[in-house]
Image (tube, rainbow, N blue to C red):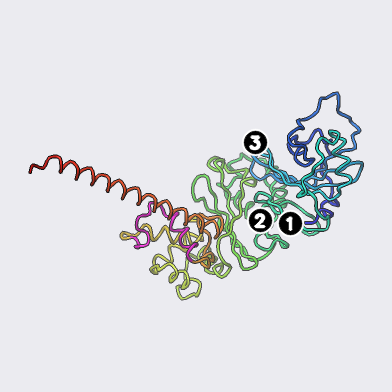
Amino acid sequence: MKPSEIYRLPTKQIDSWYSANDEMIDSVLNLGGAYNGIDWDARDEETPFKVLRKLDLTLTHNESWVYIEVLEFDGVPFAVVNRLSTEHSGPDHEAVVTDRATFEKARSYVIAAMHDKQDEDLFADPEAEIEWDLHGAIIARYGDEVRLAHRSDVGFVPDKPAFDREKMERDFDAKVRPIDLPRVEKGLHSQLGRELAFEILGDAILRGRKTMVGEFVHDTKWFAGFYETDDYVYEVYANSYTLGKDAAYWASTIDIGYLCHGKFYDVLDKMARTGEADLADPALVDLKTSFDLTDEETVQVLADVAHGREGDFVEAAVETLWQREIAPERFAGMDHPIFEQARVLAEDPEMARFGLGGMSSVKYAHDYWNRYQQTVAKREADAAAKAAEAAETEGSGDALTTRP
């Protein structure tokens, strides 16, 4: 998104610069660690230097937040800042300065030009696109509204969001919270609670086909279902220790995740709704042959994924092969199926059509598999060195006890 576009967004909150994060002010104004706030007596209620919050998002409940803010001096916006704030560590931020002259005025205003040299990386054309790491968030357009959203809510087509989290939360507040019943009677363990959850989540899915399942995988995870849009299937689930109780306030625990390629939607939908599988379907033929599964294993893997029991097809298929009485030879020496999941994706990136297993991306799987192989190689080399040392020690002992 362009800085000029961010400048024009509605302002959610206005703070004086001395109320903003000290490290951010020090870094953006290139003060070299010299700035650490100012005395109360030096604060001016009418200060021309303002910090305008434009977008914000809670990344993890009560633990981390991401903000997009604009720095303004004398009513002129001169910089945009992406800032991560957490409960457990200091802030992290990136900034782009678009107006050098106003930047200099603000900098001089704060501390009388303590440093003459500025970080040239700060300066940019206000019409140039910004490339930022938003810590798992993404700037998305929901109709005419610009928001910070979870990347998984938007999916792989960022200009067409697939899931509206804010609508889900508004509908939850309007339809579930006011119900005058004990929490357990309006939570996910009740028929009423599940029906309302299906309605609210279904309405929050903006495009494509959807299948609601609504099953507890275990006490703390509820699998809501899955939807297909733009040739990708995404899973919807609530995951929190609070679900082990009445599961009434589930909206804040909803997660969206990539499940598989869109060609698997029909077989997943059929299994979820009817419990049936057509092994002649090209999607299931692909699953069976790609992982070398039996017919029974293929149906079981499909059922596990369709009901949220084993993540995606990569995770479910590897777990199924792992549990065979005689595991495949390629598992030899491995002590956990996560390593085989990484290997599947590292050796053939096209296997990502079946999901990502426990990996965050194909690149991560490739790096993970390489690190694992390096660890195994070092382990084997150390074992060989110890064996050689033991053999040498034993040989020396024999020589000392041998008589001529």
Relative to 134, 99 lies left or right: right
Which residue position holds label 3? 87
Side (left or right) of 292 relative to 270: left
Front position among marks 3 and 2 = 3
**Which quarter shows the C terminus?**
top left
What residue is shown with label 1? 140
The amino acid at mark 3 is: Glu
User: How would you classify the magenta stretch by its main secondary structure?
Assistant: helix
Q: Sequence order check: which comes first, mark 3 or mark 2?
A: 3
- Report the front residue among 338 and 114: 114
Residues tagged 3 and 2 counted as in contact (Cβ below 8 A): no
Q: Is residue 6 magenta?
A: no
The answer to whether marks 1 and 3 mark residues whose Cβ atoms lie closer than 8 Å is no
Distance from Cα at disc 3 to Cα at disc 2: 24 Å
Q: Is residue 88 left or right of residue 293?
A: right
In the figure, residue 16 lies in which quadrant? Answer: top right
Looking at the picture, how far across and down is residue 351, in whole percent? 51, 66
Name, please, the residue furthest toward the top: 41
Q: Find residue 396 and report its horizontal and vertical position in percent.
A: 19, 43
* Amino acid type of the residue tagged 1 in the rendering: Ala
**333 part of magenta stretch:** yes
Q: Along the polypeptide, which appears first: circle 2 or circle 1? A: 1
| Distance CA(mark 1)–CA(mark 3) | 26 Å
| Quarter residue 291 falls in | bottom left
Q: Which range is magenta?
A: 327-347
In the displayed structure, would residue 193 be above or below residue 203? above
Label 2 crowd bin: few (<14), some (14–19), many (20+), radius 10 Å: many
Q: Quadrant of the N terminus?
A: bottom right
Alpha carbons under labels 2 and 1: distance apart: 10 Å
Select label 2 or label 1 by which is in front. Answer: 1
Residue holding disc 2: 153
Q: Are marks 2 and 1 in contact (CB under 8 Å)?
A: yes
